[in-house]
Amino acid sequence: MGIGIGIFLIALGAILTFAVSDPIQGVDVTMIGYICMGVGALALVIALIINAQRSNTSHTQRVERTPADPRNDPPPAA
């Protein structure tokens, strides 16, 4: 999900920076576009780092059995 949000913000920022030419009084649309592109790039990098760390985990399973309990013994072979 983070990768998609990052790409969306980069695309939105590029549209605001390079494609919108209508001036809005008191709002610099070009600067908002640059900010969106920066935040999108940062979100993309963070998402890639988190995904890389997630793949480096290992899982072990431990089963503890008590030898005094006869129910844990395997059935006799025929």
Image (spheres, rainbow, N blue to C red):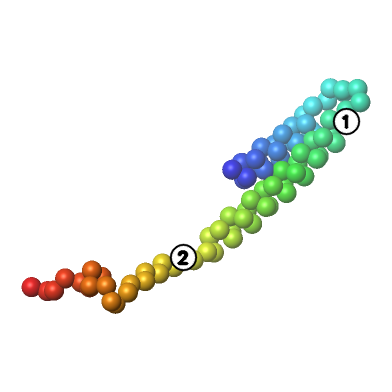
In the image, what residue type sits under mark 1? Asp
Where residue 13 appears, as percent x and y from the top left, is 75, 36
Q: Please name the residue that numbered disc 2 is placed on.
A: 59
Q: Marks 1 and 2, how far apart in space?
A: 51 Å
Q: Residue furthest right?
A: 26
Looking at the image, is mark 1 or mark 2 nearer the viewer? 2
Label 1 vs 2, first from the N-terminus: 1
Residue 70 falls left or right of residue 39:
left
Height in image: 75 above or below 31?
A: below
Q: How many numbered circles are shown?
A: 2
Extreme residue toward the bottom, this view: 67
Viewer-nearest residue: 63 or 6:
63
**What residue is drawn where x is 52% and y is 64%?**
57
Q: What residue appears at the point 79 percent right and 35 percent down from the top-left corner?
A: 33
Q: Nearer the viewer, residue 42 or 30?
A: 42
Say which amino acid is labelled 2.
His
Out of 45 and 74, give the one closest to the viewer: 74
Q: Residues within 10 Å of mark 2 (few under 14, many from 20)?
A: few
Tell me: residue 53, above or below residue 17: below
Residue 51 screen position, x and y as percent: 58, 55
Query: As rendered, which of 36 and 66 lies closer to the eye?
Result: 66
Q: Quadrant of residue 53?
A: bottom right
Q: Quadrant of residue 24?
A: top right
Q: Residue at x 53, y 60 (%)?
A: 55
Percent coordinates x, y for residue 17 in the rendering: 80, 34
Q: In the rendered view of the protein, which quadrant contains the N terminus?
A: top right
Q: Would you name the residue on which mark 1 appears?
A: 28
Q: Secondary structure at mark 2?
A: loop
- Residue 15 sits in quarter: top right
Relative to residue 21, is residue 13 depicted above or below?
below
